[in-house]
Image: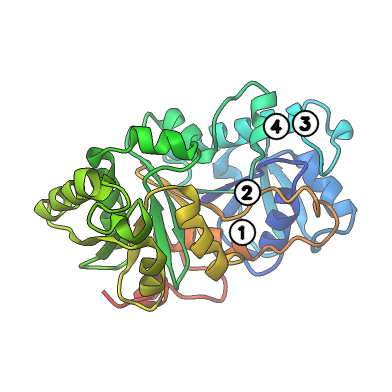
Amino acid sequence: MNTIAVTMGDAAGIGPEIILNALGGELSGAPVLVVGCLATLQRVYAAGLAPAVELRAISQVAQARFMPGVVHVLDEPLADPGALRPGRVQSQAGDLAYRCVKRAAELAMAGQVQAIATAPLNKAALHLAGHPYPGHTELLAELTGSRDVAMLLYTDRLKVIHVSTHIALRQFLDTLSAARITSVIALAGRFLQLVGYAAPRIAVAGVNPHAGENGLFGDEEIAIVAPAIAAARAQGWQVTGPCPPDTVFLQASEGQYDMVVAMYHDQGHIPLKLLGFYDGVNITAGLPFIRTSVDHGTAFDIAWQGKANPASMVAAIKLALRLVGENQPGAGTDQESMAGRPA
């Protein structure tokens, strides 16, 4: 049986409650275990923030016996669980988030789990704990020795992969390269093939308004983006662009393209979150294993209040299960529902 490990993320955020609501609800009985602080999960359950489940501590993956109503936990304890303050940035929560990701990645690299799904971490807490990573993507790349990775956002209606993410716009312009764009196009194509697209159609957004308007509003499209697209076409990928950023995401959402290559964080995140905030899944393309994640943050303002929507957590786990070939409770794995377009 293929198994998914779910990391708790920041314990002071909504991660613990959305995990328990996902595994105690729609995904009850699925081959999914939690890497996180058992005492924190027990506290969430005791506060009435999750459905009735048995929290069963295990020390190794092989001990898990998946069945409805049981949530298996590989315990990564907080330094002081009783001192955890929901909705606040704390170094112990940042350190726990790091340790959970590290342990899950080690399990995946060893083949003990076949994919990981991550609840959100808080970058400020992560940094406060001495782990100066911009986010999951960069952390997982270092833990796995992966040099060529990209953030990919997935919904049935729109799929976006990013050339750059958590850097300043000025730094993005200074570091943009044709080699990176070509690499991201290839990552997009390989992922789409993995989920059932035999001949992926990829659009590449421009950097400037109207994709530079033939150099009128900037020459990055001429000097960098167009050569990258040409190189990707030479590799056999079906690529269109550079496309005007103000229309290409609409075109993709209407079925003209299977994925859009976005140049920077907000260019891709804004349309994706507008169309699929609650069911969007964040994927790290280019790792040696499948990694999915919720497409939202720790939501400290509503944490531990029973207000958090677990839909994105459910979607992230479901997609991970599909990608490793596991049926879900009450669901199939037909390619068309998985990919959104027949292969």
For the residue labelled by badge 3, is the local secondary structure a helix, a strand or a loop?
loop
Amino acid type, residue under disc 4 in the picture? Ala
Q: Name the residue located 20 percent from the left edge and 49 percent from the top edge.
A: 222
**Which of these two is toward me, 69 or 254?**
254
Separation of marks 1 and 3 at Cα, in angstroms = 23 Å
Q: Earlier in the sequence, mark 4 or mark 3?
A: 3
**Which of these two is toward me, 18 or 205?**
205
For the residue labelled by badge 1, is the local secondary structure a helix, a strand or a loop?
helix
Q: Which residue is mark 2?
A: 119
Q: Earlier in the sequence, mark 4 or mark 1?
A: 4
Amino acid type, residue under disc 2 in the picture? Ala
Task: Determine whether label 4 and label 1 are within 8 Å by CB.
Answer: no
For the residue labelled by badge 4, is the local secondary structure a helix, a strand or a loop?
helix
Amino acid type, residue under disc 3 in the picture? Gln
Q: Which residue is mark 3?
A: 90
Q: Name the residue located 48 percent from the left edge and 48 percent from the top edge.
A: 265
> In this rendering, which labeled residue sits more in front, label 2 or label 4?
4
